[in-house]
Image (cartoon, helix red, strand yellow):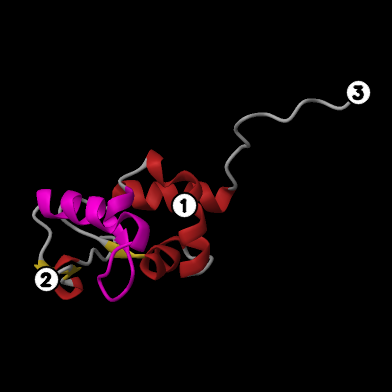
Amino acid sequence: MPAAPTAFAPLSPFAKRVLDAVDRIPRGRVMSYGDVAEYVGAGSARAVGTVMARHGSEVPWHRVLHSDGSCATHKSDRQLALLRAEGVAMRGERVDMTVARWDGR
């Protein structure tokens, strides 16, 4: 008889690296999905987005957004509120990426 599937599959090495990177983003700073992929040296913005959709609640997910500074469509109100509470530089409803982007150093 085959083993029953587990509720939580182990994270892939890529997913672990993405989550570790996001966990390092300092309060008040942000990265784009593409920035995270570049920082971990693998994947793409889309691959990072997939990891964040599946496991992002384990890290400060709100600090990762689109390269133009816009938030995830389905969570934009919550994401904007969290970013504003951290004092992230904004331009209207978008993050000012020239000011708030973290380069990983």
On residue 1, the disc is 3
- On screen, residue 25 above or below 73: above
Residue range in magenta is: 61-86
Count how many numbered circles sit on residues in the image. Answer: 3
- On screen, residue 97 above or below 5: below
- Give neighbour class at mark 1: few <14, some 14-19, many 20+ (Cα, 10 Å): few
User: Dot 2 corresponds to which residue?
Assistant: 92
Q: Residue at x 8, y 54 (%)?
A: 87
Which is nearer the N-term, disc 2 or disc 1? 1
Q: What amino acid is at disc 1? A: Ala
On residue 53, the disc is 1
Is residue 18 rendered to the left or right of residue 73? right
Q: Residue at x 19, y 58 (%)?
A: 29
- Image quadrant holding the C terminus, namely bottom left
Q: CA distance from mark 2 to mark 3?
A: 58 Å
- 100 drawn magenta: no
- On screen, residue 6 above or below 91: above
For discs 2 and 1, the disc positioned in front in the rendered view = 2
